């Protein structure tokens, strides 16, 4: 980005003078400038680029790129139903390389879930019996994925999804597991939401998470 805006970093040689041998500095020049601006000498190239960045950010003549942090509003979610033909045990097992026993268990689990979709996301919701202990009670697990299977981790959109599916005043947790329990096969994200938000807050405080 800095190079595209006219910055260059130079390395001193004997031709520049003995005092500049092994030293680095930036120059900045854009069309219509009579001469370039020269930055301070630095001990390494990365220091010179850092000083160039400082110059760019403090120079009012350069327009700083503005990046919007607000996510676009999500379309409303609607209940969805998985077609029965998709949940045939044999075809399901063949599609995902599972045994018919495992495929049958997965299909039973899918039938127990509520599925919601909009133009961008699919959210599967299931009740999990006290995964964090009896003190916190049952929670809802929201399994979230983009319909185009692209990765997503904009917390603002996950926040919107939680609000739209469960409610604005419910707290949600996201778990980063131990490597021994890691399953990483898809761009799919999971939020754990207590039916009574106080329970999740109490659990988070008690464990220091």
Image (cartoon, rainbow, N blue to C red):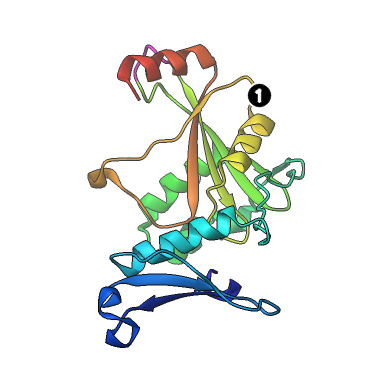
How many discs appear? Answer: 1
Residue 8 colored in magenta in the image: no
Q: Which residue is at 75% across, 43% downward? A: 73
Answer with left or right where residue 89 lies relative to residue 70: left
* Residue at disc 1, secondary structure: loop
Mark 1 surroundings: few (<14), some (14-19) or many (≥20) residues within 10 A: few
* Quadrant of the frame with the N terminus: bottom right
Name which quarter of the figure residue 201 lies in. Answer: top left
Where residue 200 sits in the image (x, y, percent)?
Answer: 45, 18
In the foreground, 48 or 144: 48
**Left-right relation of 31 to 195:** right
Residue at left 50%, top 35%?
A: 191
- Of 153 and 137, which appears nearest the observer? 153
Q: Which residue reaches farthest left?
A: 180
Q: What span is colored magenta in the figure?
A: 133-137
Which sits in the foreground, 137 or 5? Answer: 5
Measured as percent of width and height from the top left, residue 82 is found at 63, 50
| Relative image position of residue 53 (x, y in whole percent) | 49, 60
| Image coords of residue 155 (percent x, y) | 56, 41
Query: Is 42 left, or right, of 64 in this rendering?
Result: left
Q: Residue 148 lies in what quarter of the image?
A: bottom right
In which quadrant is the C terminus drawn? top left
Instruction: Classify 71 as above or below 26.
Output: above
Q: Which residue, given by chain and number where applicable, does mark 1 sit on? A: 168
Q: Which is the main secondary structure of the residues drawn in magenta?
A: loop
Q: Residue at x 52, y 48 (%)?
A: 153
- Name the residue rendered at 62%, 48% in the picture: 122
């Amino acid at each position: 980005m800095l190079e595209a805006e006219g910055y260059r970093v130079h390395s001193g040689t004997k031709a520049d003078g003995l005092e500049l041998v092994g030293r680095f500095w930036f120059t900045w020049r854009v069309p219509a400038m009579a001469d370039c601006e020269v930055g301070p000498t630095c001990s390494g190239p990365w220091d010179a680029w850092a000083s160039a960045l400082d110059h760019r950010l403090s120079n009012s003549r350069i327009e700083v790129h503005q990046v919007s942090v607000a996510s676009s509003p999500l379309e409303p979610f609607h209940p969805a139903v998985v077609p029965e033909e998709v949940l045939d045990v044999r075809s399901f097992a063949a599609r995902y390389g599972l045994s018919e026993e495992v495929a049958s268990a997965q299909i039973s689990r899918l039938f127990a879930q509520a599925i919601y979709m909009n133009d961008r996301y699919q959210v599967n919701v299931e009740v999990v019996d006290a995964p964090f202990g009896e003190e916190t009670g049952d929670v809802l697990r929201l399994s979230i994925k983009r319909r185009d299977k692209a990765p997503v981790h904009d917390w603002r959109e996950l926040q919107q999804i939680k609000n739209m599916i469960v409610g604005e005043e419910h707290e949600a947790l996201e778990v980063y597991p131990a490597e021994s329990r890691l399953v990483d096969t898809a761009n799919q994200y999971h939020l754990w939401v207590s039916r009574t938000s106080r329970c999740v807050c109490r659990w988070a405080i008690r464990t220091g998470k």
